Image (cartoon, rainbow, N blue to C red):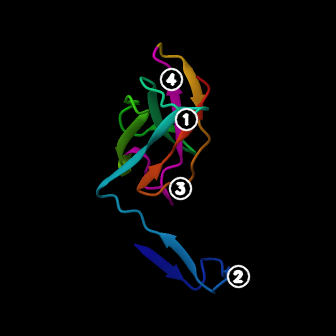
């Protein structure tokens, strides 16, 4: 659902089309981050552990359960609104950071944050083999 405002508290007015729009979070239903991890030659990287967190003013909050990439390098993590809406203070979607671990559990990549992610967010990564 999108809400539209002519002005916001404090009297600030938008420049473009004269309206402010914001997405309203629906706490019901699930969220998902998914994608594929490949090497620089485009070959899928399997058996990597993918952990997703939401980054905000309280620190990092885990999103769902970690996932392991399949033979095609694909992963999927499902999570709920309560994983990233802390004390009702979230104004957008989750600010997702992915941590990628090799089969021995060593961190090999921390992906850049994806701010205000929609309900479904695809994040594909390329890593050195």
Q: Which residues are magenta?
A: 83-103
Pointers 4 and 3 in contact (C-beta within 8 Å): no
Q: Alpha carbon of mark 2 to alpha carbon of mark 4: how far?
A: 44 Å
Q: Is residue 15 left or right of residue 128?
A: right
* Residue topped by disc 2: 15
Q: Residues within 10 Å of mark 1 (few under 14, many from 20)?
A: few
* Residue topped by disc 3: 116
* Residue topped by disc 1: 42
Residue 84 coordinates in the image, percent (x, y): 44, 47
Q: Residue at x 48, y 50 (%)?
A: 94
Q: Nearer the viewer, mark 2 or mark 1?
A: 1
Q: Alpha carbon of mark 4 to alpha carbon of mark 3: how far?
A: 24 Å
Q: Is residue 80 above or below residue 8?
A: above
Residue 113 coordinates in the image, percent (x, y): 59, 44
Q: Is residue 7 above or below residue 28?
A: below
Q: Secondary structure at mark 2?
A: loop
Residue 35 coordinates in the image, percent (x, y): 45, 42
Q: Secondary structure at mark 4?
A: strand
Residue 89 in magenta?
yes
Q: Residues within 10 Å of mark 4 (few under 14, many from 20)?
A: some
- The N terminus lies in which quarter of the figure? bottom left
Q: Residue at x 43, y 67 (%)?
A: 24
Q: Is residue 1 above or below residue 98?
A: below
Q: Nearer the viewer, mark 3 or mark 1?
A: 1
């Amino acid at each position: 659902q999108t809400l539209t405002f002519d002005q916001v508290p404090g009297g600030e007015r938008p420049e473009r089309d004269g309206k402010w729009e914001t997405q309203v979070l629906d706490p019901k239903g699930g969220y998902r981050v998914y994608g594929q991890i490949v090497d620089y030659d485009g070959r899928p990287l399997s058996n990597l552990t993918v952990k997703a967190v939401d980054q905000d003013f309280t620190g990092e909050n885990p999103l769902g359960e970690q996932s392991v990439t399949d033979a095609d390098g694909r992963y999927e993590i499902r999570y709920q609104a309560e994983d990233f809406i802390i004390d009702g203070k979230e104004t957008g979607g989750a600010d997702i950071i992915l941590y990628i671990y090799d089969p021995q559990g060593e961190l090999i990549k921390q992906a850049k944050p994806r701010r205000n992610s929609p309900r479904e967010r695809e994040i594909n990564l390329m890593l050195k083999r």
